Amino acid sequence: MVIDPGMMTTVQDRGRMGYRAFGMPVSGVMDRYAFIMANILAGNGNNAAVLEMTMHGGRFSFSQEAYIAVCGADMQGRLNSAKIKNWSGFYVPADSELAFDAAVTGCRTYLAFHGGINVPEIMRSRSTYLRAQIGGHDGRALKAGDKVEIGPVERLPSASIELSDKYVPVYANDLRLRVMLGPQDNHFTDAGILTFLNSRYTVSVRNDRMGYLLEGAVIAHKSGPDIVSDALCPGAVQVPGNGMPIIMAADCQTTGGYAKIATVIGPDLSKLAQAKLGDTIRFVVCNDQEAVAALIAETKYYEQASRELRRSTDVID
Protein backbone atom coordinates (compact mmCIF):
# COMPACT_ATOMS: atom_id res chain seq x y z
CA MET A 1 0.00 0.00 0.00
CA VAL A 2 1.11 3.57 -0.66
CA ILE A 3 1.73 5.42 2.61
CA ASP A 4 3.30 8.47 0.95
CA PRO A 5 3.55 8.72 -2.87
CA GLY A 6 6.51 11.09 -2.91
CA MET A 7 6.69 13.96 -5.40
CA MET A 8 5.36 12.05 -8.41
CA THR A 9 5.16 8.27 -8.66
CA THR A 10 3.53 6.59 -11.64
CA VAL A 11 3.18 3.10 -13.09
CA GLN A 12 5.21 2.81 -16.32
CA ASP A 13 6.47 0.24 -18.80
CA ARG A 14 8.13 0.66 -22.23
CA GLY A 15 5.12 2.59 -23.51
CA ARG A 16 2.44 2.48 -26.21
CA MET A 17 4.18 1.54 -29.41
CA GLY A 18 2.38 1.98 -32.72
CA TYR A 19 -0.28 4.55 -31.78
CA ARG A 20 1.36 7.88 -32.59
CA ALA A 21 -0.39 7.96 -35.98
CA PHE A 22 -3.63 8.25 -33.99
CA GLY A 23 -2.33 11.05 -31.77
CA MET A 24 -1.37 8.89 -28.77
CA PRO A 25 2.11 9.57 -27.32
CA VAL A 26 4.41 6.66 -26.50
CA SER A 27 4.64 7.57 -22.81
CA GLY A 28 6.39 4.85 -20.78
CA VAL A 29 9.51 5.14 -18.68
CA MET A 30 11.81 8.11 -19.04
CA ASP A 31 14.99 6.12 -18.29
CA ARG A 32 14.97 2.94 -20.40
CA TYR A 33 18.31 1.74 -19.06
CA ALA A 34 17.46 1.88 -15.34
CA PHE A 35 14.01 0.41 -16.09
CA ILE A 36 15.34 -2.64 -17.93
CA MET A 37 18.12 -3.24 -15.41
CA ALA A 38 15.57 -3.08 -12.58
CA ASN A 39 13.45 -5.71 -14.31
CA ILE A 40 16.49 -7.92 -14.91
CA LEU A 41 17.36 -7.72 -11.21
CA ALA A 42 13.75 -8.45 -10.26
CA GLY A 43 13.67 -11.54 -12.47
CA ASN A 44 11.10 -10.13 -14.91
CA GLY A 45 10.84 -9.77 -18.65
CA ASN A 46 12.10 -6.46 -20.01
CA ASN A 47 8.65 -4.85 -20.23
CA ALA A 48 7.12 -5.57 -16.81
CA ALA A 49 5.48 -2.47 -15.34
CA VAL A 50 7.38 -0.66 -12.57
CA LEU A 51 6.99 2.40 -10.37
CA GLU A 52 8.81 5.49 -11.63
CA MET A 53 9.58 7.94 -8.80
CA THR A 54 10.67 11.51 -9.56
CA MET A 55 12.96 13.67 -7.42
CA HIS A 56 11.58 12.41 -4.08
CA GLY A 57 10.54 8.82 -3.53
CA GLY A 58 7.55 7.42 -1.72
CA ARG A 59 6.88 5.18 1.27
CA PHE A 60 5.22 1.80 0.84
CA SER A 61 3.99 -1.02 3.08
CA PHE A 62 3.91 -4.68 2.04
CA SER A 63 1.05 -6.88 3.22
CA GLN A 64 2.72 -9.93 1.66
CA GLU A 65 6.26 -11.01 0.93
CA ALA A 66 7.80 -9.78 -2.31
CA TYR A 67 11.03 -9.58 -4.26
CA ILE A 68 11.94 -6.16 -5.59
CA ALA A 69 14.72 -4.27 -7.34
CA VAL A 70 15.72 -0.59 -7.22
CA CYS A 71 17.67 1.21 -9.95
CA GLY A 72 18.26 4.78 -11.07
CA ALA A 73 18.67 7.88 -8.92
CA ASP A 74 19.88 7.32 -5.37
CA MET A 75 16.86 8.17 -3.21
CA GLN A 76 18.43 6.81 -0.02
CA GLY A 77 16.10 3.83 0.19
CA ARG A 78 15.46 2.01 3.45
CA LEU A 79 13.76 -1.30 4.18
CA ASN A 80 12.43 -1.41 7.73
CA SER A 81 14.81 1.49 8.54
CA ALA A 82 17.87 -0.40 7.23
CA LYS A 83 19.62 1.22 4.28
CA ILE A 84 19.24 -0.64 0.98
CA LYS A 85 21.72 -0.74 -1.89
CA ASN A 86 20.76 0.92 -5.13
CA TRP A 87 21.02 -1.13 -8.36
CA SER A 88 20.17 -4.32 -6.51
CA GLY A 89 17.40 -6.87 -6.03
CA PHE A 90 16.34 -8.28 -2.66
CA TYR A 91 13.63 -10.13 -0.74
CA VAL A 92 11.04 -8.17 1.25
CA PRO A 93 9.24 -9.96 4.12
CA ALA A 94 5.52 -9.46 4.68
CA ASP A 95 4.56 -6.51 6.91
CA SER A 96 7.64 -4.56 5.82
CA GLU A 97 7.98 -0.87 5.00
CA LEU A 98 10.07 0.52 2.16
CA ALA A 99 10.86 4.24 2.23
CA PHE A 100 12.71 6.67 -0.03
CA ASP A 101 13.85 10.28 0.41
CA ALA A 102 15.04 12.99 -1.97
CA ALA A 103 17.38 12.01 -4.79
CA VAL A 104 21.01 12.77 -3.96
CA THR A 105 22.14 11.85 -7.49
CA GLY A 106 20.01 11.75 -10.61
CA CYS A 107 16.30 12.45 -10.81
CA ARG A 108 14.27 9.25 -11.34
CA THR A 109 14.25 5.92 -9.49
CA TYR A 110 12.64 2.68 -10.69
CA LEU A 111 11.07 0.19 -8.31
CA ALA A 112 10.45 -3.20 -9.94
CA PHE A 113 8.51 -6.08 -8.39
CA HIS A 114 9.02 -9.74 -9.27
CA GLY A 115 5.83 -10.45 -11.21
CA GLY A 116 5.41 -6.87 -12.36
CA ILE A 117 2.49 -4.58 -11.50
CA ASN A 118 -0.98 -5.88 -12.23
CA VAL A 119 -2.92 -2.99 -13.77
CA PRO A 120 -5.03 -3.23 -16.95
CA GLU A 121 -3.34 -2.90 -20.32
CA ILE A 122 -4.60 -0.02 -22.45
CA MET A 123 -3.39 -0.05 -26.04
CA ARG A 124 -1.01 -2.89 -25.13
CA SER A 125 0.68 -0.92 -22.35
CA ARG A 126 0.32 -0.41 -18.61
CA SER A 127 1.99 3.01 -18.74
CA THR A 128 0.40 6.10 -17.22
CA TYR A 129 -0.24 8.99 -19.60
CA LEU A 130 -1.14 11.76 -17.19
CA ARG A 131 -2.46 14.37 -19.63
CA ALA A 132 -5.10 11.99 -21.01
CA GLN A 133 -5.61 10.25 -17.64
CA ILE A 134 -5.24 6.77 -19.07
CA GLY A 135 -3.22 3.73 -18.08
CA GLY A 136 -1.37 2.89 -14.91
CA HIS A 137 -3.35 3.36 -11.70
CA ASP A 138 -6.58 5.11 -12.79
CA GLY A 139 -4.63 7.28 -15.22
CA ARG A 140 -2.92 9.32 -12.49
CA ALA A 141 0.05 9.51 -10.17
CA LEU A 142 -0.19 7.41 -7.03
CA LYS A 143 -1.59 8.91 -3.85
CA ALA A 144 -1.67 7.85 -0.21
CA GLY A 145 -3.92 4.86 0.38
CA ASP A 146 -3.57 3.38 -3.10
CA LYS A 147 -2.98 -0.35 -3.30
CA VAL A 148 -0.50 -1.58 -5.91
CA GLU A 149 -1.20 -5.17 -6.91
CA ILE A 150 1.82 -7.29 -7.81
CA GLY A 151 1.37 -9.80 -10.63
CA PRO A 152 1.08 -13.51 -9.81
CA VAL A 153 4.30 -15.50 -9.39
CA GLU A 154 5.02 -19.20 -8.84
CA ARG A 155 8.03 -18.79 -6.55
CA LEU A 156 9.85 -15.78 -5.19
CA PRO A 157 13.63 -15.48 -5.48
CA SER A 158 15.33 -15.14 -2.12
CA ALA A 159 18.97 -14.25 -2.76
CA SER A 160 20.01 -10.60 -2.80
CA ILE A 161 21.84 -9.64 -5.98
CA GLU A 162 23.42 -6.45 -7.26
CA LEU A 163 24.80 -5.15 -10.51
CA SER A 164 28.53 -4.97 -11.05
CA ASP A 165 29.82 -1.40 -10.88
CA LYS A 166 30.62 -1.52 -14.60
CA TYR A 167 26.88 -1.49 -15.36
CA VAL A 168 26.04 1.37 -12.99
CA PRO A 169 26.00 4.82 -14.63
CA VAL A 170 27.41 7.90 -12.94
CA TYR A 171 24.89 10.73 -12.91
CA ALA A 172 26.89 13.88 -13.62
CA ASN A 173 25.65 17.46 -13.47
CA ASP A 174 27.20 18.20 -16.86
CA LEU A 175 25.87 15.92 -19.61
CA ARG A 176 27.00 15.25 -23.15
CA LEU A 177 24.17 14.07 -25.37
CA ARG A 178 24.83 12.57 -28.79
CA VAL A 179 22.60 13.92 -31.55
CA MET A 180 21.96 13.39 -35.21
CA LEU A 181 21.34 16.68 -37.02
CA GLY A 182 17.97 17.21 -38.69
CA PRO A 183 15.43 16.70 -39.97
CA GLN A 184 15.14 20.49 -40.34
CA ASP A 185 18.70 21.61 -39.66
CA ASN A 186 18.50 23.48 -43.01
CA HIS A 187 16.12 25.94 -41.28
CA PHE A 188 19.02 27.23 -39.18
CA THR A 189 21.97 29.43 -40.09
CA ASP A 190 25.45 27.92 -40.08
CA ALA A 191 26.18 30.11 -37.07
CA GLY A 192 23.03 28.83 -35.38
CA ILE A 193 24.12 25.21 -35.78
CA LEU A 194 27.58 26.04 -34.44
CA THR A 195 25.95 27.78 -31.47
CA PHE A 196 23.88 24.66 -30.78
CA LEU A 197 26.92 22.38 -30.90
CA ASN A 198 29.43 24.63 -29.13
CA SER A 199 27.34 25.96 -26.24
CA ARG A 200 26.50 24.65 -22.80
CA TYR A 201 22.76 24.74 -22.05
CA THR A 202 21.12 24.64 -18.63
CA VAL A 203 18.05 22.61 -17.67
CA SER A 204 15.35 25.12 -16.79
CA VAL A 205 12.51 24.84 -14.29
CA ARG A 206 10.29 23.89 -17.24
CA ASN A 207 11.19 20.22 -17.45
CA ASP A 208 8.88 17.24 -17.07
CA ARG A 209 7.85 14.00 -18.76
CA MET A 210 6.79 15.95 -21.86
CA GLY A 211 10.09 17.72 -22.51
CA TYR A 212 13.10 19.65 -21.28
CA LEU A 213 13.27 23.40 -22.04
CA LEU A 214 16.91 24.49 -21.95
CA GLU A 215 18.40 27.93 -21.40
CA GLY A 216 21.57 29.34 -22.93
CA ALA A 217 22.90 30.82 -26.15
CA VAL A 218 20.26 31.77 -28.74
CA ILE A 219 20.14 29.50 -31.82
CA ALA A 220 19.55 31.52 -35.01
CA HIS A 221 16.95 30.47 -37.57
CA LYS A 222 17.25 31.42 -41.22
CA SER A 223 13.71 32.74 -41.57
CA GLY A 224 11.69 31.94 -38.47
CA PRO A 225 10.93 28.82 -36.42
CA ASP A 226 7.68 27.65 -37.97
CA ILE A 227 7.21 24.65 -40.24
CA VAL A 228 4.19 22.72 -41.44
CA SER A 229 3.48 20.49 -38.45
CA ASP A 230 5.07 17.07 -38.79
CA ALA A 231 5.91 14.06 -36.64
CA LEU A 232 7.61 14.38 -33.26
CA CYS A 233 9.32 11.67 -31.25
CA PRO A 234 11.14 11.51 -27.91
CA GLY A 235 14.61 12.99 -28.40
CA ALA A 236 13.61 15.52 -31.07
CA VAL A 237 15.10 18.96 -30.39
CA GLN A 238 12.71 21.73 -31.35
CA VAL A 239 13.81 25.37 -31.44
CA PRO A 240 10.93 27.88 -31.14
CA GLY A 241 11.14 31.60 -31.85
CA ASN A 242 13.12 32.46 -28.72
CA GLY A 243 16.02 30.31 -29.95
CA MET A 244 16.06 28.04 -26.87
CA PRO A 245 16.15 24.27 -27.57
CA ILE A 246 13.43 21.98 -26.24
CA ILE A 247 14.19 18.24 -26.04
CA MET A 248 11.08 16.11 -26.38
CA ALA A 249 10.62 13.38 -23.76
CA ALA A 250 8.42 10.31 -23.23
CA ASP A 251 5.05 12.11 -23.03
CA CYS A 252 5.73 14.47 -25.93
CA GLN A 253 2.95 15.26 -28.39
CA THR A 254 2.93 13.40 -31.70
CA THR A 255 3.28 16.42 -34.00
CA GLY A 256 4.85 19.85 -33.75
CA GLY A 257 5.23 23.02 -35.78
CA TYR A 258 8.71 24.20 -34.76
CA ALA A 259 11.83 23.34 -36.76
CA LYS A 260 13.85 20.48 -35.29
CA ILE A 261 17.58 21.07 -35.37
CA ALA A 262 18.55 17.56 -34.19
CA THR A 263 17.46 14.38 -32.43
CA VAL A 264 19.07 12.91 -29.30
CA ILE A 265 19.86 9.23 -29.90
CA GLY A 266 17.85 6.67 -27.94
CA PRO A 267 20.60 5.41 -25.61
CA ASP A 268 21.30 8.96 -24.42
CA LEU A 269 17.69 9.71 -23.48
CA SER A 270 18.33 7.77 -20.27
CA LYS A 271 20.97 10.36 -19.38
CA LEU A 272 18.49 13.16 -20.04
CA ALA A 273 15.89 11.43 -17.85
CA GLN A 274 18.23 11.78 -14.86
CA ALA A 275 18.92 15.49 -15.47
CA LYS A 276 17.35 18.06 -13.14
CA LEU A 277 17.03 21.80 -12.72
CA GLY A 278 20.41 23.51 -13.06
CA ASP A 279 22.23 20.62 -14.73
CA THR A 280 24.06 21.53 -17.94
CA ILE A 281 23.98 19.86 -21.34
CA ARG A 282 26.28 19.87 -24.37
CA PHE A 283 25.37 18.34 -27.72
CA VAL A 284 27.77 16.18 -29.75
CA VAL A 285 27.09 15.17 -33.35
CA CYS A 286 27.14 11.49 -34.25
CA ASN A 287 26.33 9.67 -37.49
CA ASP A 288 23.99 6.78 -38.30
CA GLN A 289 26.65 4.13 -37.73
CA GLU A 290 27.63 5.55 -34.33
CA ALA A 291 23.98 5.73 -33.25
CA VAL A 292 23.38 2.10 -34.23
CA ALA A 293 26.58 1.04 -32.49
CA ALA A 294 25.43 2.78 -29.29
CA LEU A 295 22.11 0.93 -29.41
CA ILE A 296 23.86 -2.41 -29.99
CA ALA A 297 26.22 -1.72 -27.07
CA GLU A 298 23.25 -0.93 -24.80
CA THR A 299 21.52 -4.16 -25.78
CA LYS A 300 24.69 -6.16 -25.14
CA TYR A 301 24.94 -4.61 -21.67
CA TYR A 302 21.51 -6.04 -20.81
CA GLU A 303 22.48 -9.47 -22.12
CA GLN A 304 25.83 -9.48 -20.29
CA ALA A 305 24.29 -8.29 -17.02
CA SER A 306 21.61 -10.99 -17.26
CA ARG A 307 24.20 -13.73 -17.81
CA GLU A 308 26.39 -12.56 -14.94
CA LEU A 309 23.45 -12.33 -12.55
CA ARG A 310 22.24 -15.81 -13.53
CA ARG A 311 25.71 -17.22 -12.83
CA SER A 312 25.85 -15.49 -9.45
CA THR A 313 22.45 -16.81 -8.38
CA ASP A 314 23.39 -20.32 -9.58
CA VAL A 315 26.43 -20.19 -7.30
CA ILE A 316 24.26 -19.02 -4.36
CA ASP A 317 21.66 -21.74 -4.98
Image: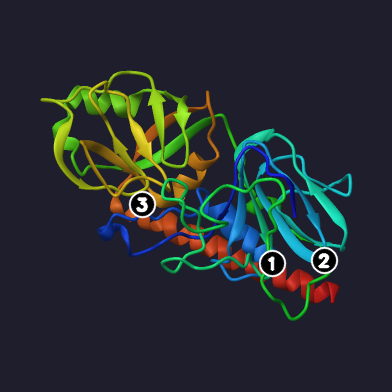
Q: Residue at x 64, y 68 (%)?
A: 306
Q: Name the residue under label 3.
A: 290
Using the numbered discs, state the Cα–Cα distance from disc 1 to disc 2 in whole angstroms.
Answer: 10 Å
Q: Contact, CB < 8 Å: mark 1 with mark 2?
A: yes
Earlier-in-chain disc, 1 versus 3: 1
Position of 107 compared to 245: left or right? right
Looking at this view, is 89 or 97 the one in front? 97
SS at badge 1? loop
- Looking at this view, name the residue that lies furthest to the bottom: 154
Q: Where is residue 105 in the image (x, y as percent from the top left)?
A: 65, 35
Three-letter amino acid code at disc 1?
Ile
> Which quarter of the rendered picture does the C terminus lie within?
bottom right
| Quadrant of the rendered image containing residue 56 | top right
Looking at this view, is 44 or 25 the one in front? 25
Mark 2 is surrounded, within 10 Å at the Cα level, by few (under 14), some (14 to 19) or many (20 or more) other residues, namely few
Three-letter amino acid code at disc 2?
Gln
Using the numbered discs, state the Cα–Cα distance from disc 1 to disc 3 in whole angstroms.
Answer: 39 Å
- Looking at this view, name the residue that lies furthest to the top: 217
SS at badge 3? helix
Three-letter amino acid code at disc 3?
Glu
Q: Can see residue 163?
A: no
Q: Position of residue 225 (x, y in %)?
A: 18, 29
Nearer the camera: disc 3 or disc 2: 2
Q: Mark 1 points at which residue?
A: 150
